[in-house]
Amino acid sequence: MQDTKINDIIKTYIKNLKQIDAKDDDMILSLIDSIEFLELVLFLEEKLGYEIDLSDNDPHEFSTIEKLAKVLSGK
Amino acid sequence: MENNFFDTLKNKEYVFFKECYKTCNGYCCNNFHADSFKMIDSHNVILPMIEAEFLSMQKNGGMDNVKDFYHKTFWLKCGVGLKLYFLKCGVKGLCSPHCNRPLVCKIYPYFPLVDEKGEFLGVREVAMLDLFYKDDKNHPCTLVNTHKDELLKQFKSSTKELLKEPVMIFVFMALELLDKYLMKYFKNYFNEPFLDVLSENERKDFFKKYENNALLFKAWRNDDFKNEINELYLRLEVLYQEKLSRYFIKANDEKIHP
């Protein structure tokens, strides 16, 4: 899936959860807590149809909405 | 919640070493490895508790300066859920009133290892990052690196009441399982995943993987762990029945406990 599409999914998820219009460069954990981040990942796995494995990624590489979308589009 | 076990714990203490925080810069109340993390909140320590403890704390007035929390219900395969609250604490030991602090703080640095009947079997580090020291002498907590023998004697005696309570037996046995799978996960990457053994570069990689796991729960998102914790609950439920199950949520009760 394209990163722009994943980007939209993440923003919509956050909008529904927190009623916030998130921006590409927002730090995800400034918008949601770490448990909500886990829920977001589970939601994305359902949408993408595979288990997300970021264990070899530096957390810095998926810290913002834009970065997370890019990392996932390359998986 | 009526007859909440946690209501009986107010003012109870389990570790008795006067002003030990003066010897370690308050290690237990600080996120000493904060600089090693890139995403997770470095200013707070996260204090987990089951819903019954949270409700009891609220009933007792809680803590004046530690009020920020989030929660999540974790579902077992058999269809029951355990609602956990995560209190964010950044007051570095100055919580007030101190007697209302969470159980995880009161029993630090250990939790008791128990069998299904609540028999004391030993101890294990209660803070997950503390598991990753090979030699107690290198552990940052003074109670561990200097006073362990005395502490164990205290702990065996002071936690006796806790070990009579079925939900605490479940919690402590579940913690042991969480630790087992966390260690197994790290052993995929490091022969000896210990902070006092790893090289500088390996430590960087360790913290990267630790942070990833804190966000993605990879160590526990597998069938082996899910089956083991489910079987643990079922075994204990046979033994303790309603005394245990009353602390859990049935799938169709979620709306009652939002």
Image (cartoon, coloured by chain):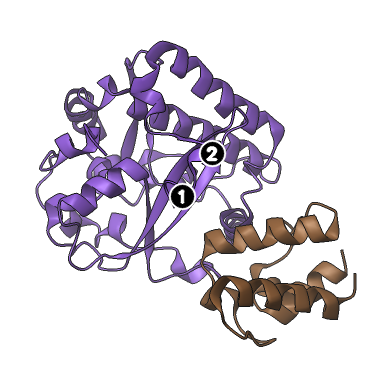
Name the one closer to the observer, A17 or B169: A17
Q: Position of residue B22 (x, y in %)?
A: 16, 59
- For label 1, the residue is B129
Q: Chain of mark 1?
A: B
Q: Specify whether B221 is left or right of B47.
A: right
Out of B230 and B174, give the one closest to the viewer.
Answer: B230
Mark 2 chain: B
Above-or-below relation of B230 to A44: above
Q: Nearer the viewer, residue B90 or B22?
A: B90
Above or below residue B63? Residue B130 is above
Which residue was labeled with disc 2? B252
Question: Mark 2 packing: few (<14 Cα in 10 Å), some, or many (20+)?
Answer: few
Nearer-N-terminus badge (2/1): 1
Query: Going by the picture, which residue comes out furthest to the right?
Result: A1
Which residue is found at the position 50% from the left and 24% from the top?
Answer: B233
Whether residue B228 is visible, yes or no, is yes
In the rendering, at what x and y percent does residue B32 appear? 39, 63
Q: Colour of chain A?
A: brown
Residue type at tag 2: Asn
**Closer to us: mark 2 or mark 1?**
2
Residue plotted at (26% across, 43% down) = B103
Residue B105 seen in render: no
Q: Residue at x 84, y 76 (%)?
A: A5
Q: CA distance from mark 2 to mark 1?
A: 35 Å
Give me the residue at 80% from left, 71% from top. Answer: A71
Q: Secondary structure at mark 1?
A: helix
| Left-right relation of B111 to B81 | left
Q: Is residue B18 left or right of residue B226?
A: left
Give above or below for B189 relative to B67. Answer: above
Instruction: Tell me the amino acid under the disc marked 1.
Output: Leu
Question: In the rendered image, what is the letter of the chain coloured purple?
Answer: B
